[in-house]
Amino acid sequence: MVKKLILLSFILCAAACTAKPASTPLPTPSTGQIDMEQQAVYAFLLSNLYQHRGYVIMDTTATGVTGVENTTQTLDYVLQNMHSVDSGTVVSFRSRNDAAYPISPDMNIGGPYTLLSQAGRQQIFGENQSGWEIFYERYPQAPGITTLSRVGFNNSLDQALVYIGTQSNWLAGSGYYILLKKLNGAWNIDQRVMTWIS
């Protein structure tokens, strides 16, 4: 009996000594790191999707055509159609898009851009049928009016989820949720899910 207890103690001790240490969680990225990566994601998407020399971006964030009101329902649909999305990326996206936030007027996104307020948009389109003609007279370099969400990231800042939508005429526009992965220091599109088209 004593031998069995000694043997059992030895086995338990050996197992404890060879057990892998618990992995330490990655530190939460700083606000500065997130802001830099968000600008890098915006720059990559704008140049990759549109390749224009200038952009008109709504001055507040949104997660769809109607703002941020339907984020939960839309995001549930998007996640059903994406795979391998890190839970941290989803949590970050939800928390960073709990309301509409102002877009920074001094981002480095690889090219010039103009921020357009809702009042400015209403002024162009509110009372006449030739709103898009007026728009392109003012902003000939733009692909249309682009709306961006804030970007959700995982803790290692190598996966990102963002909404981007662009309306370029009365019946020409679309919106996507895009999952990106960072490979060798550069962002790349991994998956995209369209949430509206006109």
Image (cartoon, grey):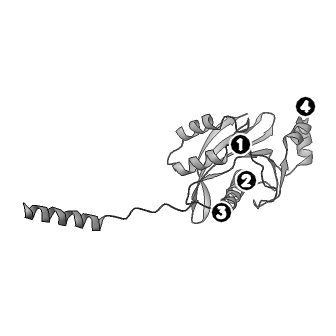
- Are the two marked residues, 3 and 4, in contact with CB atoms closer than 8 angstroms? no
User: Under tag 2, what secondary structure?
Assistant: helix
Distance of label 3 from label 4 (alpha carbons): 44 Å
Q: Residue 33's mark?
A: 3
- For the residues marked 4 and 2, what is the alpha-carbon distance in whole angstroms? 28 Å
- Identify the amino acid type marked 2: Leu
Of the two numbered discs 3 and 2 in the rendering, the one whose residue sits closer to the viewer: 3
| Amino acid at dot 3 | Gln
Where residue 192 appears, as percent x and y from the top left, is 60, 45
- Quickly name the residue at label 4: 129
In contact (CB < 8 Å): disc 4 and disc 2: no
Q: Nearer the viewer, mark 2 or mark 1?
A: 1
Q: Earlier in the sequence, mark 4 or mark 1?
A: 1
Write down the residue under mark 1.
Answer: 99
Alpha-carbon neighbours of circle 4 within 10 Å: few (<14), some, or many (≥20)? few
The residue type indicated by label 1 comes to Ala
Q: Determine the CA span between mark 4 and mark 1.
A: 31 Å
Q: Is residue 93 left or right of residue 115?
A: left
**How many neighbours does mark 3 have within 10 angstroms: few (below 14), some (14-19), or many (20 or more)?**
few
What type is the residue that disc 4 sits on?
A: Gln
Q: Quadrant of residue 144?
A: top right
Q: Residues within 10 Å of mark 2 (few under 14, many from 20)?
A: many
**Cα gap from disc 3 to disc 2, whole angstroms:** 20 Å
> Which residue is the site of mark 2?
46
Q: Is residue 98 left or right of residue 109?
A: left
Q: Seen from this angle, which residue lies furthest left?
A: 1
Residue nearer the viewer, 151 or 141: 151
Quick check: 78 left or right of 141? left
Q: Position of residue 44 (x, y in %)?
A: 69, 57
The first of marks 3 and 4 along the sequence is 3
